[in-house]
Image (spheres, grey):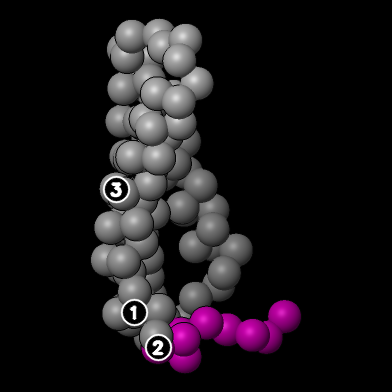
Amino acid sequence: MRAFGEARLAALKTRLSLTPEQQAGNWAAFEQAARDLGKLRIDRRIALRSATPCNDPVERLRRRASQPEGRTEAVRAFEPHRADQSWISTEA
């Protein structure tokens, strides 16, 4: 599964046609944030498979409500770089 994520990142980087300045500036931070989110997704799937089944709908909602915490932290790691959007090319 991780190899698929790495291939998607490589394809995205190729399609974006980043300049060397753009690659040096923010690509590494974006790439790390994407990897962190992918790892969280894999960990969440593993946890769901190993969790005991729950027939109580309220308990299922509680479990789901606790999941976005890790995602928020991974996205916030990229926040300082997102403020500077000069690395984003708007040319087609």
Residue matched to label 3: 70
Disc 1 vs disc 2: Cβ atoms closer than 8 Å?
Answer: yes
Q: Residues within 10 Å of mark 1 (few under 14, many from 20)?
A: some
Gap in Å between the C-alphas at discs 1 and 2? 6 Å
Q: Which mark is residue 81?
A: 1
Q: Quadrant of residue 2?
A: top left
Establish if 8 lies above or below 16: above
Secondary structure beneath disc 2? loop
**Quick one: 33 or 25, which is closer to the camera?**
33
Question: Taking the image as drawn, is residue 41 in sight?
Answer: no
Disc 3 vs disc 2: Cβ atoms closer than 8 Å?
Answer: no
Q: Amino acid at mark 3?
A: Gly
- Inspect the magenta stretch and tell me whether residue 44 lies in it: no
Residue matched to label 2: 84
- Give the magenta range: 84-92
**Quick one: 61 or 1, which is closer to the camera?**
61
**Quick one: 40 or 65, which is closer to the camera?**
65
